[in-house]
Image (cartoon, rainbow, N blue to C red):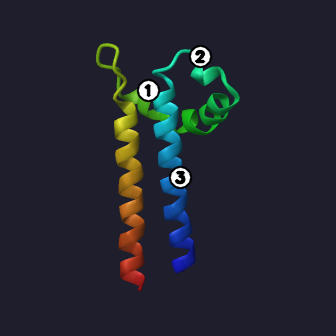
Amino acid sequence: MYFVISLLQQLIQIYSWALIIYILMSWFPNARDTSVGRFLARICEPYLEPFRKIIPPIGMIDISPIVAFLVLNFAQRGLVSVYQMIG
């Protein structure tokens, strides 16, 4: 059980970094048009899209990724809690 929880935590950590890189790419023109940008869009946009539907941008600032990070953080903390309860 420890292996599964540890693996899920690592996947969440990697996905968090992918989100950070994807979001920072929006600051640079044409960065999302590269092969790395397209790959990150394929894995990040399906997760970010529901948050963008719920949370409208404030001016030109999209705050939905902040909420997406909070949800990932809660998921990771939940895994830690489950592990502590089991172990």
Residue placed under numbered mark 1 in the picture: 53
Which of the labelled discs sits on residue 14, or is there none?
3
Q: Residue at x 35, y 37 (%)?
A: 66
Q: Is residue 15 above or below residue 2?
A: above
> Residue 51 sits in which quadrant?
top left
Residue type at mark 3: give it. Ile
Q: Residue at x 64, y 34 (%)?
A: 42
Residue placed under numbered mark 2 in the picture: 30
In contact (CB < 8 Å): disc 1 and disc 3? no
Front of the two marks 3 and 2: 2
Q: Which sits earlier in the primary sequence, circle 3 or circle 2? A: 3
Q: Tag 2, which secondary structure? A: loop
Tell me if I can see residue 49 in this picture.
no
Residue 27 point in image, percent of width and height: 45, 21
Residue type at mark 2: give it. Asn
Q: Which quarter of the rendering shows the N terminus?
A: bottom right
Residue 65 point in image, percent of width and height: 40, 35
Alpha carbon of mark 1 to alpha carbon of mark 3: how far?
24 Å
